[in-house]
Amino acid sequence: MNQLFLFVIFPFTVCIAQSQEIVFKSKGKINYPLTTDEKIMFDSIQYRTFLFFLNEHHPEFGIVKDRTTSSSPCSIAATGFGIPSFAIGAERNWITREQAADITLKILKFLINSEQSTATDATGYKGFYYHFLKMDSGKREWNCELSSVDTGLLMMGIIFARNYYNKNNDIEKNIRSLAAKLLERIDWNFMQMPPTGKFAYTISMGWSPEKAFHDMGWTGYNEALFLYILAAGSGMENAEEGYTSWLKTYKFYTPYIKFSHVAFPPLFGHQFSQAFIDFRDIADKYMREKGIDYFENSRRATYVQRQYATDNPKGWIGYDSLCWGVTASDGPSEKYNFDDKKFLGYAGRGTSGPGFNYFDDGTIAPYASISSLPFTPEIVVPTIKSMNQKYGKKLWGKYGYFDAINSTANWIDDDFLGIDEGPMIIMIENFRTGLVWNYVMKDPVIQKGLNKLGFKYLK
């Protein structure tokens, strides 16, 4: 009798436990009142940044250039950021919703119809896409890699699109249909590393027909956090094991009192995932043990960068509490070197405080601080105002802020980069309305991925 009772109850209990998935909801806009002048300032920043995507996308393919130079190829990551940027333009009445939907549909049609094969000039393979594509043909450029993280950023834009374009007309129905096909076509198992070693079951950084797989997988903490959620929610096998490998390489660092956090020196690594996913009050097992979520983690990382600039241990000209933001960006290049000062061109700059730098040569990227707006509006807003007053039109051009400035080298960039413009317009919008968070968080792929990787509410 007792054995029969246990036999009946046990499977029922397991069934109930498996079905209790958490529904994660975005918390929406940040509660930080802006003055009328501050609202006008952010309108200007967003509008100029939006013009990059409006003017630098292919009129037929919809894909977005990497940067504004005439020879620049398409960046599939910039295209991923561009998709919600067109919607932001529609929400702010800079273009119509129909125009935004039309550009988005062109992108999806190009992607679904482009060549997927092992050919060296294909556009992609196994549902993934090459990092850079020729703007005139949409074919692979520069023998670049089939990129997992850049494809992921593209797909996050597509996830936004299939939730935002929810009207019952032919264009928006077609967007939803093609988005589903593109997401389902990705073979995540193809991009998974072998089951042994440091990178066991992690997602490979890339593949090429000439060299096969990259010898490293994505391990944390960096901009690829969203990639594991996307892959897990899309059915990648051994996703939990891969995420465990990712978490094992975290570095919890305390550069200053009260600012202990999982470190990643360039600020973009704290911003890319959170341009799409609202991590407020939700955390995986590692972060729950630390008692914080990834949003709080990024808040602390942002404060660390401000404190580092205030202390200015290397004595760079311009660094202070109202001029900070070290991240991947353009730079002066070696031709500006003098005395013991060494400068690089485009580089993955960053700092997590004393003793934990990637590379810091005195280069500040405006998008680094601005894209941290949702995390720390109380220090970002005055920083933007100060930079505007300090540099004025020297730092401002056709598409808003130039990519970077280095006062020590007496250098200001004259270019704009899509992967830097995108987080800026999106994070400002998330701060103001929660737009991108609201539509991405409701997607079943994101919901499934968060649940599968063990995210739970902290409170």
Image: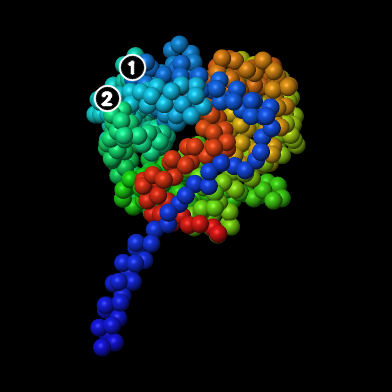
- Is 347 situated left or right of 364 in this image? left
Pick the residue in front: 263 or 451.
451
Numbered mark located on residue 60 in the image: 1
- Is 283 situated left or right of 360 in this image? left
Mark closer to the chain start, 2 or 1 = 1
Pick the residue in front: 99 or 325.
99
Image-quadrant location for residue 37 = top right
Image-quadrant location for residue 355 = top right
Marks 2 and 1 in Cβ contact (< 8 Å): no
The spot of residue 216 in percent (x, y) is: 41, 40
- Give the class, few, some or many, for how many residues have Cα within 10 Å of label 2's Cα (few <14, many ≥20): some
Pick the residue in front: 226 or 260.
226
The spot of residue 67 in percent (x, y) is: 48, 19
> Disc 2 residue type?
Ser
- Secondary structure under the numbered disc 1 in the rendered image: loop
Q: Can residue 157 be seen in the rendering of this structure? A: yes
Q: Residue at x 59, y 25 (%)?
A: 43
The spot of residue 222 in percent (x, y) is: 51, 41
> Disc 1 residue type?
Glu
Give above or below for 433 relative to 8.
Answer: above
The spot of residue 87 in percent (x, y) is: 45, 29
Discs 2/1, front: 1
Pick the residue in front: 308 or 338.
308
- Give the class, few, some or many, for how many residues have Cα within 10 Å of label 1's Cα (few <14, many ≥20): few
Q: Residue at x 53, y 47 (%)?
A: 27
Give above or below for 7 relative to 295.
Answer: below
Q: Work out how far the residue at label 2 is from the one at label 1, CA to CA, in angstroms.
A: 13 Å
Q: Residue at x 58, y 20 (%)?
A: 400
Numbered mark located on residue 114 in the image: 2
Q: Can residue 361 be seen in the rendering of this structure? A: no
**Which residue appears farthest toward the bottom when viewing the image?**
1
